[in-house]
Image (tube, helix red, strand yellow):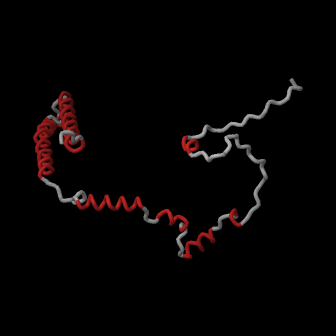
Amino acid sequence: MADDPEPPRKFYQLKPKDFERVNRVPGASVAPVVPAPDAGPAPIDDRHRRIDVRELIRQGAAGAPLLSANQPANRPNEVHGVLKDKFEHDRAHGLFHVEPGDDKERRQRIRNYWLLLVLVDAPFLWLAWKVNPLRGLGPASAIVFTCAIAGFGMFTAWWTWHNWFLRTER
């Protein structure tokens, strides 16, 4: 076993992606890439020096755009032209014309909300006021009082949710 030769080294890599398979350079080998030996730490040159705050302040005070290398990518191109034509076409057909909507439905919904809230909650509150356990009407009044307050709270919560947050019919 100690005398057996070492098996050849295996190189593992990811499968080529669709883009790499379709856009393969003619004549390029498919052989695995052997990494170069590590050369050790790279010498420090002007590109790899430490970032200094004073240097950043100096660049900011210069007034020159720091991202000037990105400007060619932001030039108008044919896509911008197509989008502008589409926008002008849509605007000519009135797709961006906005008018205030009819407020009748909203006012009707507010009126119905308050009307039903008063009509249903008023009896609950009247009952809770009449059987208030602090008046000394007995222990049964506490149960009726609690049920009246619970009915008031449950209906108010349900009606508010149904009228303002659960808008499925329109």
Extreme residue in the right direction: 3
Extreme residue in the bottom direction: 62
Report the quarter where the N terminus lies.
top right
Q: Residue visible at 23% across and 40% down?
A: 166
Task: Give percent across and percent down for residue 82.
Answer: 36, 59
Extreme residue in the front direction: 27
Question: Going by the image, does 74 lie left or right of 151?
Answer: right
Task: Give percent across and percent down for residue 142.
Answer: 21, 31
**Residue 12 occupies quadrant:** top right
Question: Going by the image, does 64 lie left or right of 89?
Answer: right
Depth order, front residue of 120/128: 120
Depth order, front residue of 89/139: 89
Question: Going by the image, does 94 lie left or right of 4?
Answer: left
Q: Residue visible at 47% across and 64% down?
A: 74
Report the quarter where the C terminus lies.
top left
Task: Give percent across and percent down for residue 42.
Answer: 76, 57
Q: Is residue 38 above or below residue 75?
A: above
Depth order, front residue of 94/164: 94
